[in-house]
Amino acid sequence: KAGVTQTPRYLIKTRGQQVTLSCSPISGHRSVSWYQQTPGQGLQFLFEYFSETQRNKGNFPGRFSGRQFSNSRSEMNVSTLELGDSALYLCASMGASGDTSTDTQYFGPGTRLTVL
Amino acid sequence: GESVGLHLPTLSVQEGDNSIINCAYSNSASDYFIWYKQESGKGPQFIIDIRSNMDKRQGQRVTVLLNKTVKHLSLQIAATQPGDSAVYFCAEALGNQFYFGTGTSLTVIP
């Protein structure tokens, strides 16, 4: 079974631009979570989607948004980019039930975003 | 919010020795725990997990111990190899959401 895939793997943008990142979960998984990882920081939770609905949300500004499609693929959008948005953005998927009592979470390779 | 803390930010071990990486979690209601390994430039890789109804689980060269009394989790790596050099994260699950610590960087000395 293929793992979680993310595109693009690397991205360079300038301040003020917007960016869209894509994530394809493991086949059959319906939960997709997004995380931001920066040097010296742990994984910061952005949001989680399950069956096309945002189920959980972290403490990020409204410039960060996401969505999930009927095939469970998810996109994350960041508008009006700031220098501090430079980070590794990780996507993780969880199984068909989206329930941690039965499923586990697997990560993709991440998208490295650099904002100049 | 939840916090998952790691006792040591860095750990160096000699090749062939056993490694122990520790983690403290804050919420006694957390019922599921995962250890991840992250190599430079890659996403976190699932290593082993444990549910709160267990106190020990073994995998290939890895063992996770859970002490619910003191809310402590540890990862033991047997016969540590150079390929084990990475950052290790523990995560706790609560309400279908995961909370991560900042990670411990393990360096294996040949």
Image (tube, coloured by chain):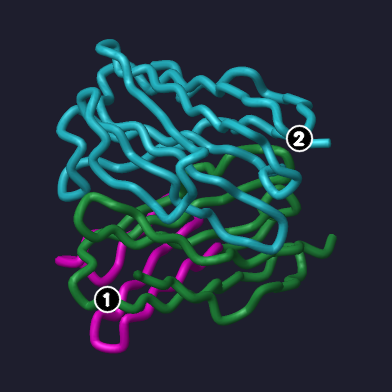
Q: Which image quarter is the N terminus of chain B in?
A: bottom left
Relative placement, left or right, of A82 versus A77 is: right
Q: Residue furthest top?
A: A71
Relative placement, left or right, of A71 versus A65 is: left
Residue B27 numbered mark, or none: 1
Q: Could you tell me residue A12's position as x and y percent?
A: 78, 26
Is residue B11 positioned above or below B71 on the image? above
Q: Is residue B69 magenta?
A: yes
Q: Is residue A20 magenta?
A: no
| Subunit ID for the residue under disc 1 | B
Tell me the CA gap for discs 1 and 2: 39 Å
Say what secondary structure mark 2 lies in. Answer: loop
Closer to the eye: label 1 or 2: 2
Q: Which amino acid, by three-letter code, is at mark 1? A: Asn
What is the drawing colour of chain B? Answer: green
Q: Which residue is mark 2?
A: A15
Residue A47 visible in this rendered orientation of the protein: yes
Relative placement, left or right, of A10 versus B44 is: right
Q: Which residues are magenta?
A: B51-77
| Crowding near the residue tagged with mark 1, few <14, some 14–19, many ≥20 C-alpha atoms within 10 Å | some
Q: Could you tell me residue B103's position as x and y percent?
A: 59, 64
Question: Residue at (25%, 72%) from the top-left corner?
Answer: B55
Question: Residue at (72%, 39%) from the top-left corner?
Answer: B41
Is residue A26 positioned above or below A40 on the image? above
Query: Which residue occupies the foreground of this view, B57 or B53?
Result: B53
| Crowding near the residue tagged with mark 2, few <14, some 14–19, many ≥20 C-alpha atoms within 10 Å | some
Q: Quadrant of residue B88?
A: bottom right
| Subunit ID for the residue under disc 2 | A
Does the CB distance between marks 1 and 2 fall below 8 Å?
no
What is the drawing colour of chain A? Answer: cyan
Q: Which amino acid, by three-letter code, is at mark 2? A: Arg
Q: Could you tell me residue A21's position as x and y percent?
A: 55, 23
